[in-house]
Structure formats: C-alpha cells, structure tokens
Image (cartoon, helix red, strand yellow):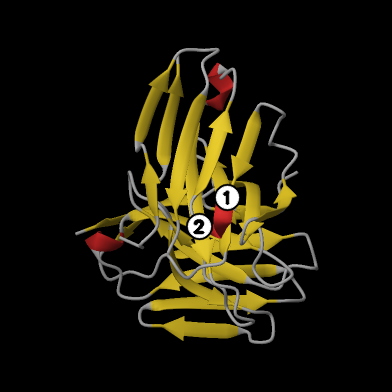
Amino acid sequence: DTGVSQDPRHKITKRGQNVTFRCDPISEHNRLYWYRQTLGQGPEFLTYFQNEAQLEKSRLLSDRFSAERPKGSFSTLEIQRTEQGDSAMYLCASSLVSGSEDEQFFGPGTRLTVL
Amino acid sequence: QQQVKQSPQSLIVQKGGIPIINCAYENTAFDYFPWYQQFPGKGPALLIAIRPDVSEKKEGRFTISFNKSAKQFSLHIMDSQPGDSATYFCAASDFGNEKLTFGTGTRLTIIP
C-alpha cells in the first residue's frame, strides 16, 4: 500500500453514461497525476496538477474528460458520454516536488469497463 | 509516437538467473529513468531510478545500466526469485520528473 487510494476500484457502465473517479494522494504531496493503462500496455499520461492548478493535459484527454483538484487535495476524473474505447485502468499517482528524485507513488487504479 | 521502446515483451528465467530488460529512448531531453514493477491488480511501484550523470546504479538485487550516447538503459535482476515474477516497465521523463513516458512492459516469469 503506497498511501495513494482510488475509488472505486472497479466500475462497469453502459456506453453513453457519465462516470467519476476519485483519487486521494499522500497527504503532503503537492503533485497529482492521472494515467490510463490498457491491457498489455504501459501507463499513458493524461494530466497532472501541482496543488490545485492543472498544469498539463495530454492530447489523449478529449473534451469528454475533465479533471479537478479542488483545494489541492483529492482529485476527481470525470468521463462524460463514455465509449467502449474508454475501457481501461485509470491510475493516479502523487509526488512531492523537492528538487531531487521526485518519486511518483501510484494508487491501485480504477478499472473501467464500458459495455 | 512511442518514445520509449522496451524489449523483450516476455521473459522466462530460471531461479537464480539474471534477467535483463532493455529500453531505448528517442527524446534527448529525458533526464530521469525509473523502472517500475507491477503485479496483477496493483499499481506500478518504483524499483530503482537513474539520472544520466551516472552509468550504473545498484539497489539491492536490482541494477540499472545506462548508456547516454546510445540512448539505452537496462535493468538487471541478480539472483532472481519466483517472487520477482511480475511485469516490469521502464519509463522516462524530463524537467524534474513530470509526466512519465512508459515502455510497453516486460512480463517476467521466474521458474523454480
């Protein structure tokens, strides 16, 4: 257990529905990242926050995806009008930017299945 | 565009052997190269990481070898054990460990 928690762990939804995932980072960490991992592939970067500011979004993050980190604590990732291609593991990671090696600690992920 | 290429895709090694996993990168701005271990149903966990100012780093049974001119780095696992059976990912990033670019993973199996 790295200290990063994600909820829910599994989500099954029908195409066209909206889903929201939550990530609670390690409490003192100021950076929070979202990645997506499909079967047999490495995680792909989606977006990241430093405190409450969203600093970068990947082109993988279509307009149907939105992420927030209010008050610089937990973060939510919402997918609107889900498509079957959104089925994947959504991973959250956090780190403390300190100028040295800023290890990213990953949560267990939320596995999304879109039927 | 795949910026980090990883090989082999899968690897079977006998207990006590030394599995070697290789990665190559294209972006010369990368300056941080971690290796992650992932078990089924779990998130990736950092094993060891290296910066380009050194050519080798050892932590316990894990060693990273880094070749800056060839833009390649590799993971060696000494005295491998069945408990090391997992998927291993190399990754790279720049500007102080921001977004990580991952390789496609190597599924390692250590047989007794």
Q: State the residue at coordinates (54%, 18%).
A: A84
Q: Quadrant of the C terminus of chain A?
A: top left
Amino acid type at circle 2 is Ser
**Residue B35 position in % (x across, y down):** 51, 65
- In the rendered structure, the answer to whether residue A65 lies left or right of residue A92 reads right
> Seen in the image, is A57 located left or right of residue B55?
right
Where residue B68 sits in the image (x, y, percent)? 73, 76
Mark 1, chain letter? A
Q: Residue furthest left?
A: B112
The local crowd at label 1, few if under 14, some if 14 to 19, many if 20 or more residues have their Cα within 10 Å, is many
Task: Evaluate if marks 1 and 2 touch, with contact meaning CB atoms under 8 Å apart.
Answer: yes
- From where the camera sits, is residue A39 visible? no
Disc 1 residue type? Answer: Arg
> Same subunit under labels 1 and 2?
yes
Name the foreground residue: B12 vs B41: B41
Tag of residue A73? 2
- In this view, A19 is above or below B40: above
Residue B72 visible in the displayed image: yes
From the image, tell me which residue sits under label 1: A69
In the image, what residue occupies the spot 52% across and 12% down? A15
